Amino acid sequence: MMLCFTKFPLSYFRQNDRRRSSCGELPTSSKGSDDPSSGGTTPYSGSYPSSLVGSMDRVTYTWTNMNVYCAQQEQREGFFGWNRRRYFGERKHILKNVNGAAYPGELLALMGSSGAGKTTLLNTLTFRSGKQLDVTGMRAINGEPATAETITALSAYVQQDDLFIGTLTVREHLIFQALVRMDRWIPYEARMKRVEEVISELALTKCQNTLIGIPGRIKGISGGEMKRLSFASEVLTDPPLLLCDEPTSGLDSFMAQNVVQVLKNMALKGKTVICTIHQPSSEVFAMFDKVLLMAEGRVAYLGTSHEACDFFSQLGAPCPSNYNPADFFIQLLAVVPSREETCRQTVDLICDTFENSEAGQKFAQPPLITTKTTFEEEIDIARSPYKAKWSAQFRAVLWRSWLSVKKEPILIKVRMLQTFMVAMLIGIMFFGQELTEDGVMNINGALFLFLTNMTFQNVFAVINVFCSELPIFMREHSNGMYRADVYFLCKTLAEIPIFIAIPVLFTVVTYFMIGLTPEPYKFFNTALIVTLVANVATSFGYLISSISSSVNMALSIGPPVVIPFLLFGGFFLNTGSVPPYFKWLSNLSWFKYGNEALLINQWSDVDYIECEQNTTCPKNGAVVLQTLNFYVDDFYFDILALLGLIVSFRIFAVREVHPSASTSLCLNPTAPPAKTKLEKGAEMSSLRGYGKWAPDVEGVTLTWHDLSVYVPAEKEGGLFRKQSKPHKRLLNSVSGAVKPGTLVALMGSSGAGKSTLMNALAHRNPVGVVVDGDIRVNGRPIGPYMNNLCGYVPQEDLFVRDLTVKEHLTFMAWMRLDRRTSRFERRRHVLDLLSILGLSERADTRIGATGHEKVLSGGEKKRLAFASELLTDPPLLFCDEPTTGLDSFSAQKIVQMMGSMAAQGKTIVCTIHQPSSEMFSLFHELILLVDGRIAFMGTPNNAVTFFESLNYRCPENYNPADFFIHTLSVTPGDEERSRVAVKAICDQYTVSEHARAVDLLVHYERHLAESCEIPSDHHRAPRTKFKGPLLSTQFFWLAYRSFLCVLRDPAVQKLRIVQKLGIAIMAGLCYVGTQLDQRGIQAIQGALFIFVTENTFSPMYSVLALFPQEFPLFMREYKSGLYGVGVYYLSKLIAMLPGLVLEPVVFVVASYWLIGLRTTLYAILMTVFITVMTMNVSTACGCFFSTAFESPTFAMAYLVPFDFLLMATSGLFIKLRLVSLL
């Protein structure tokens, strides 16, 4: 229902003799929250003084006349096409004279619909507003003006995103948090006792010794446990002021209740707690002491929930009975599409009424200035954002860093094995070198390969690890947990064993195999130099990661930045030939210092080199060094220079990652979606007749009988010793039926089996899943035809962000509709869907991603996902959590849309998480799952009656959905009794009349199908006539989509071209005017090798992360039958082809004549051809490695040594005729 109105009272809420709700405290259910064994928690009552946990000063936080402005934003094209931003026009008024207060002992909830200003207000209260926001007004703590330092010292902030070190256990993470976040004078025993209490309070006991986990690499705790761990990290310090951003996001209603109960208990201890919350359940809402309702950036109400109901009742809008007050308030204050003006008038009326009320006037009064508290005086004196001393920070961060390194043995073993194998191959290639003319060249090449291997191996290893940890570091450092220098120092010390062991292992294996100088001190010198170079590369990797926003960017800029340092290493260009204007860059090259030190160490004491007669070759080691322009006296300077580079790169990295004021973009205001035709109830037939199925011809009845689903259990043991376990059963002999025109909700707590059941019914089971039972459509067994028969809307909305809404649907129309469909009909289907789903006004808007301008809202993306499936007009539709991440108003619109589609004869099954009261009433049938069994299936009204018959009565003013999930949940601390009660409910349902009615329908459909004389495939005849698009059509549209992405995101391509141009000019200036003498030959060989390396490493590593990024979308479209693997891969290569031709041509044209290479047309064209082919082959190699491994981390671990071996056998470092292995 739409709760927008202009005149009071509302007769709508009094229809059907509904009684007014007092909105008081909800009656206690059978699983009360006061008893810890029933899921509640008790306040902390330790044996030591509570002051040991944190400051017990009571905090009253007030804010008066808060206004927040944001300038509109426009993108302009600047010099050379680079995007430059500027702000223009009138400032957007986001918060408008917001007043409020949070008192000790109270839990205050900030609520409102999307765009109301909740998050902006919370960011303002925590002093985390972006630079583009202008904030005015007064914020005060106990009457004293608040500052960012005061808030940081007095408060804790629970953010919505969960960021952890995945290799730690839950207990280890909390111990670390206790060491760095609790006041420095608290003893260790008190810290550990607090850790135990928090683990118990937040029901983390069972998973306390479980790794947190890394998605795709290390299996860890569940999403709900991760959210509780995030909350526990903040609760540890027992702060007087706690601010939480959506602390219940991603949790089922029962677990959300437990989290809010912890907040409530903290408030009862005298803490001031403020949180934003999304779709609170009835019981959760009852826990709030006060609510602050926001609408259009203004305060609509601030006070207790009981007084809120009275306030709105006086305005003629009483909360209906059996209705969640939170849902009612949000609906009431929402701006309904197509009725914006009327609803805004209503919102203004409500806000003006509260502002002029006695309560509103009280909050508008500025606080009285009081004397500073003792705690505030301590803040003024110390002015340090860190709770722990420098030494304590150092010990804690070092301990965590070492644990993180130690608990990833697979990567360590892979790197050690990779180093050993590369060293063995290098040793075999250069085995037994003698002191001859050829031996000099080969030994010099081998020593330079020592440097290149250590550089590329360590730079990319650091990029992989540090880029993933950087967001964690930024958050923890900004929260005042530790200093940036402490973090880098501890990372260095924790990783020293690895970054020493790897170069030493490499040196030990190769040194004596090659036949280098056998003196022990020279061996140790070589090991020292190689170790120093490895650590310089590590420091440089930290610097590259620090200036990059992602792994992709680091991989793109890393190789081209290394190339200049490689160029000035003394191997490709004699150090005496370096132009004066590049001397400064040469002095920063660790290749130069490492190469010079290694060659001095090798040749300084060599008195004789065997030379053939009548040949020019160095007679001894001194001549070798003289030829290379190296001096023995510079050996110790080279060592000191390497040490200096290690420290310098680390210092610059620390400066780069040192967080400044947070920045955030003010997005362009999103146009509200137009009211959809489905909501209007008009033109229902426009969804029919899309060429595959017509619901009015035949609906779909979906039945399943004795359905069980098994997954392979995990295997225990090491790499070579695994013990198999039996399969784990997720669904236990469930039966059910869904008829045409029905909207069914699959509900249950986390782990109940909702997604498993839906995937089995949709015939989309993951690999390894075993399905046992009978699933039928209109009485006939399901099969591969389900891909054409049903639509499937996944929970995650995956799109190509650079496409517009219309372009996306056009692409889908060409890929999913019958090939015989005309262009006009496809266009008409797209336009109809845009109109029906209310996306017409957003048709030319790019889909975008979070953080970009002009993006679709969450609700619009979800409707676009529906549109993608509705193109084929499927009679059967599955939706996985279609309302996740949406506010209650947007979620309700989505469910209303599904209800309208069901009214057309479609069969719709969806899983749903925490539906609001009104949303729950929109479902025709309900399936409650618990522990893989069905607890009830039938209408929502029958569900209430069924539970009442079992003495589980749903309280008045309580959302039935919340009540069912709460009743069927397993209470932490009382698991056995809860499971017995849940099992009894499932057993009672099995013998109930509801289950018998389902079984009757299942057998009726099967009997009808078996007795019918219609051919067995008649039910899917319309689908079997479907003809998919031709391969040429698939290729064209895939290539078209890829080209659009390249054209609309040209920054990377421009950066690579400028990079090519810069390195080409640099190389040309280094080799300009090269003569054909001995030094000139060395220079030309080096220049040509730069042609190869620059067009190899950069494209290879930049593409390494491309396919893993697009893999989820590719797998979804591939499994949906949109296209094949070969067509997709070919289209991607074609889209990249212009860049793969243009970049090497730019490089050759810019450097060829500067160097002075042969000027014949044949030589020029051949150089261009070879360079272009080199770049294309390297790109293909990068594509192969990116698709051959599950993550860029492992792909890079194998690609780096592979590249190194290819480079070693290029002929520049060793004469190929001397390599017997080849």
Image (tube, rainbow, N blue to C red):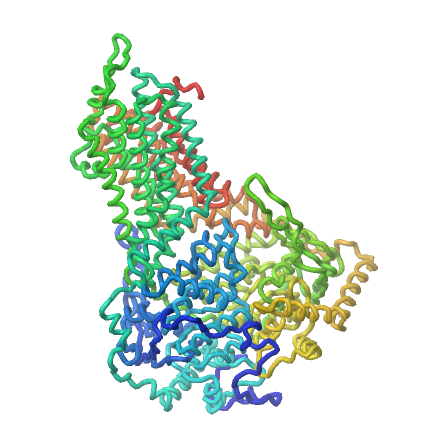
What residue lies at 57% left-to-right and 72% top-to-bottom?
37
User: Which residue is farthest left?
Assistant: 580
- x and y, in percent, of residue 1122 in the image: 57, 50
- x and y, in percent, of residue 978 in the image: 63, 69
The correct choice, above or below, for 60 with respect to 1222 in the image is below
The answer to whether residue 1065 shows anywhere in this view is no
Left/right of residue 163 with respect to residue 796 in the rendered view: left
The front one of 1015 and 631 is 631
The answer to whether residue 607 shows anywhere in this view is yes
- x and y, in percent, of residue 372 in the image: 25, 78
The correct choice, above or below, for 425 with respect to 355 in the image is above
Left/right of residue 333 with respect to residue 1168 in the rendered view: right
The correct choice, above or below, for 83 with respect to 532 in the image is below
What residue lies at 39% left-to-right and 53% top-to-bottom?
400
Query: Where, by quadrant of the figure, is residue 892 drawn?
Result: bottom right
The front one of 476 and 742 is 476
What residue lies at 31% left-to-right and 30% top-to-bottom?
524
